[in-house]
Image (cartoon, rainbow, N blue to C red):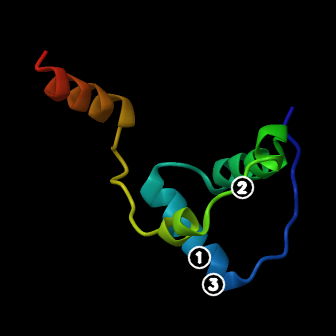
Amino acid sequence: MNNKLTLSIDNQVIIKAKKYAKNSGRSLSDLIENYLKNITSTEVENFTISPKVKSLMGSFSTPADFDYKIELSKAISEKHQI
């Protein structure tokens, strides 16, 4: 069951977030919902990201049509010469 939520967020952040969502082929609601799920999951509560990994976060973006399953399959096939 979905509920509406009203948030107060800086207008520039909203503009950038909407652009990011559009380029990712996702809705802003989906991005926010998944973010909230991630930060509230019990698995994440006990998980610490190293400073090195934190410094890399957001350093690149993938095309909207990127499918990691296809790319992973290609990499495995190349590795094992399938």
Say left or right for 77 vs 9: left
Neighbours of disc 1 within 10 Å: few (<14), some (14-19), many (20+): few
Work out whether 22 lies above or below 8: above
Which residue carries the number 3 mark? Answer: 12
Give me the residue at 66% from left, 47% from top: 30
Tell me the quadrant of the picture where the C terminus can be found.
top left
Mark 3: which secondary structure?
A: helix
Mark 2: which secondary structure?
A: loop
Return the residue nearer the eye: 36 or 56. Answer: 56
Q: What residue type is disc 2 on?
A: Thr
Give me the residue at 43% from left, 59% from top: 23
Where residue 2 sits: x, y (%)? 84, 38
Q: Which mark is residue 5?
A: none
Which residue carries the number 2 mark? Answer: 48
| Image depth: mark 1 or mark 2 in front | 2
Where residue 11 sits: x, y (%)? 69, 83
Question: CB atoms at circles 1 and 3 under 8 Å apart?
Answer: yes
Q: Earlier in the sequence, mark 2 or mark 3?
A: 3
Work out whether 23 lies above or below 14: above
Q: What residue type is disc 3 on?
A: Gln
Mark 1: which secondary structure?
A: helix
Q: CA distance from mark 2 to mark 3?
A: 29 Å
Return the residue nearer the eye: 37 or 55. Answer: 55
Work out whether 3 lies above or below 17: above
Give me the residue at 81% from left, 47% from top: 46
Q: Which mark is residue 15?
A: 1
Give me the residue at 88% from left, 44% from top: 3
Q: Quadrant of residue 1?
A: top right
Neighbours of disc 2 within 10 Å: few (<14), some (14-19), many (20+): few
Question: CB atoms at circles 2 and 3 under 8 Å apart?
Answer: no
Where residue 66 sits: x, y (%)? 34, 43
